[in-house]
Image: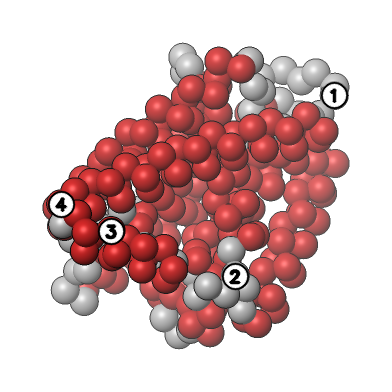
């Protein structure tokens, strides 16, 4: 249950520092421009995320395809949420941005607290020799950078407390789809089939020995779903708190 490895300690803090420096420079140069201009860096990240995922799917197909690579993980949400936040400008766009900011905030928080759960030291060590390992590290760091930019460039304006329901319902929808697929295909999407944290997995197995497989899996999936929803909801409010202290004060045209 090691939160950080030496490899994470050597690579993640410098990467985060570089992201913050770039974000500050962008804030100073385009921070008071229109939202259309401020959104360009996030649009670039969105394109990179999609390109990385396309590459991952191609490599997986070349190797016989691993069902684990179906984009049903929590992290897979960013393939959809970040591009939607970056490019969608129609009706309800602030709701879409609230969902994107919440998801990115959730990933950024978990990555900074427990990076070893997101990707292992072996992924870092094989960064330059394996596309899939490079994808794992680069993808999650790009999401972290996306969150830094969302905050630094003020890319979403909260519309009130009622807005919190949109990240919650989006997460509920994800949990229903991902948990169902995980238990039907017996593939561990978003920890819905089994737990990657050893002590908690031992508890799951102990419950299964008492109740049987199906009741234990239903209970486990419900608990993981509830925790996932609560975590995303909490990330939304953490994002609101951070944004309150960093919002660009000068009004700008959208």
| C-alpha gap between disc 4 and disc 3 | 11 Å
Label 3 close to label 1 by CB (< 8 Å): no
Question: What residue appears at the point 43 percent right and 53 percent down from the top-left corner?
Answer: 75
Horizontal side of 197 relative to 11 (left or right) equals left
102 lies above or below 126: above
Q: Nearer the viewer, residue 111 or 247?
A: 111
- Measured as percent of width and height from the top left, residue 140 is found at 52, 59
Disc marking residue 214: 4
Nearer the observer, disc 3 or disc 2?
3
- Measured as percent of width and height from the top left, residue 202 is found at 36, 68
Disc marking residue 207: 3
| C-alpha gap between disc 1 and disc 4 | 54 Å
How many residues crowd around disc 1 within 10 Å: few (fewer than 14), some, or many (20 or more)?
Answer: few
Give the image quarter of residue 159: top right
Nearer the observer, disc 1 or disc 4?
4
Question: What residue appears at the point 70 percent right and 78 percent down from the top-left corner?
Answer: 10
Instruction: Point out the tag, 4 or 2, that comes first from the N-terminus.
Output: 2
Q: Nearer the viewer, residue 126 or 212?
A: 212
| Residue bearing the label numbered 2 | 3
């Amino acid at each position: 249950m090691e939160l950080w490895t030496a490899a994470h300690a050597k690579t993640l803090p410098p990467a985060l520092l570089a992201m913050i420096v770039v974000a500050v420079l962008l804030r100073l140069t385009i921070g008071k421009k229109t939202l259309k201009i401020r959104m360009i860096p996030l649009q670039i990240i969105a394109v990179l995320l999609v390109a990385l995922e396309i590459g991952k799917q191609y490599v997986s197909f070349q190797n016989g395809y691993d069902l684990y690579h179906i984009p049903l993980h929590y992290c897979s949400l960013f393939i959809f949420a970040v591009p939607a936040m970056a490019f969608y400008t129609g009706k309800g766009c602030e709701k879409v941005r609230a969902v994107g900011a919440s998801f990115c905030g959730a990933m950024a928080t978990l990555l900074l607290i427990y990076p070893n759960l997101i990707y292992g030291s072996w992924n870092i060590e094989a960064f330059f020799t394996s596309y899939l390992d490079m994808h794992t590290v680069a993808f999650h760091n790009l999401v972290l950078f996306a969150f830094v930019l969302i905050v630094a460039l003020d890319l979403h304006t909260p519309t009130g407390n009622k807005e919190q329901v949109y990240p919650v319902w989006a997460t509920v929808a994800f949990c229903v789809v991902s948990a169902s697929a995980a238990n039907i295909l017996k593939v561990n999407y978003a920890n819905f089939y089994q737990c990657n944290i050893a002590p908690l997995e031992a508890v799951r197995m102990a419950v299964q020995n008492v109740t049987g497989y199906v009741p234990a899996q239903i209970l486990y999936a419900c608990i993981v779903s509830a925790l996932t929803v609560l975590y995303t909801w909490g990330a939304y409010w953490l994002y609101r708190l951070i944004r309150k202290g960093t919002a660009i004060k000068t009004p700008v045209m959208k």
